[in-house]
Amino acid sequence: MAINKISAPRATPRVYIALALAAIAWWIAYTILQPLAEFVAYNILALERGSHLGEAVAFFLYDVPKILLLLSAMIFFITIIRTFFSPERTRQLLGGRRVGIGNVLAAMLGIVTPFCSCSAVPLFIGFVESGIPLGVTFSFLIAAPVINEVAVVLLFGLFGWRVAALYIASGLTIAIFAGIVIGRLNLERYVEDFVWQLQFTAAPDESGKLTWDERITRAINAVRQIVGKVWLYVVIGIAVGAGIHGYVPTDALAEVMGKSAWWSVPIAVLIGIPLYSNAAGIIPIVSALIEKGASLGTALAFMMAVVGLSLPEMIILRRVLKPQLIAIFIGVVGIAIILTGYLFNLVM
């Protein structure tokens, strides 16, 4: 039967028991983080409660393990979902979709499809070769790096579910809007000529053939690999954030990055575009800036510019896109981020 061929067998009972024990250990560790961080800072290290150094150290000791625990859990579950959406299956799902519906679907698939800057070129070539419209392809390329599990976890952990949900919604809106605009401009002439001459060879889609044991193993490996790559960014970002938390006077940034400074959003985006960091490094800094008086819209616009318009990805995409299209891409997405920043400042 066809259904039996694509159905994934259940995991062994031992796997379920191990996952249950891991979940219990995770929950216990998460619940004791704050009192443990304060005990270490104020009792073991004997720092004065309320002092600049004491507040900074307590902030650091609490936020680093909290973010890493949240990150590990989210990566595990997102990777399980991603095993059902291989890049090849994503390409197949987007094939033949008309503009509009295709942009929405591409942006949503960008969230759950494995993606990194190094995969931007092969994915772009595969999408174009499959007949997927250029604008739909860009909706995917914008959503994938901006709305990833690292950004969602950090935003949820530092700001709560409301800000995380608004960020996801705004990220999807930017990806859809920018993709539609780029598609309407008929910019295919600015794609390098060799791209249209390539014959893309599709990799076999094995996402439906994986067993649950294999999916869980991939999720565990993903946790090890991703946390292993970003933990240092988390530590550095939170260290900078802890310094801001402990030493920068309250409301010190209100005049520069507050709601009253109308120019703060475009300036933040212009500063963020040439910079490069991942979400793990930039979000803890954004959190500390907001705590000290920066407006939410301005800070998140800065973060989106850094993460969504990263310099390495632009350099990699230059292999398949002419400078004119890259400039238009940066301009359209940059304007969308600025408008989103103003919207956040208006409603929050």
Image (spheres, rainbow, N blue to C red):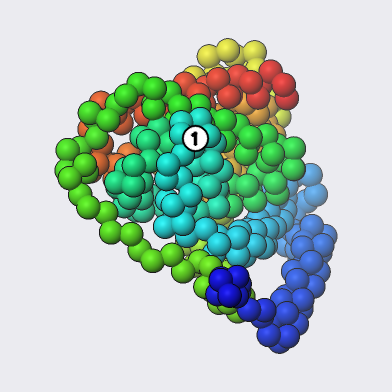
Residue type for callout 1: Asn
Residue 110 placement, left or right of 130: right
Residue 201 in view here? yes
Residue 228 in view here? no
> Which residue bears the numbered disc 1?
103
Residue located at (79% from left, 44% from top):
50
Could you tell me which quadrant the N terminus lies in?
A: bottom right
Which percent across, then down, holds residue 247?
A: 65, 38
Total count of labels: 1
Q: As displayed, is residue 33 above or below residue 142?
A: below
**Who is closer to the viewer here, 151 or 53?**
151
Residue 75 placement, left or right of 142: right
Residue located at (80% from left, 49% from top):
49
Which percent across, then down, holds residue 252?
A: 65, 25
Instruction: Give the secondary structure at mark 1.
Output: helix
Which percent across, then down, holds residue 96?
A: 42, 41
Q: As displayed, is residue 136 above or below residue 68?
A: above
Q: Residues within 10 Å of mark 1 (few under 14, many from 20)?
A: many
Residue located at (46% from left, 45% from top):
94
Could you tell me which quadrant the C terminus lies in?
A: top right
Residue located at (56% from left, 56% from top):
235
**Who is closer to the viewer here, 293 or 321?**
321
Q: As displayed, is residue 272 above or below residue 111?
A: above
Q: For residue 138, which quarter of the picture?
A: top left
Which percent across, then down, holds residue 98?
A: 46, 34
**Who is closer to the viewer here, 263 or 301?**
301
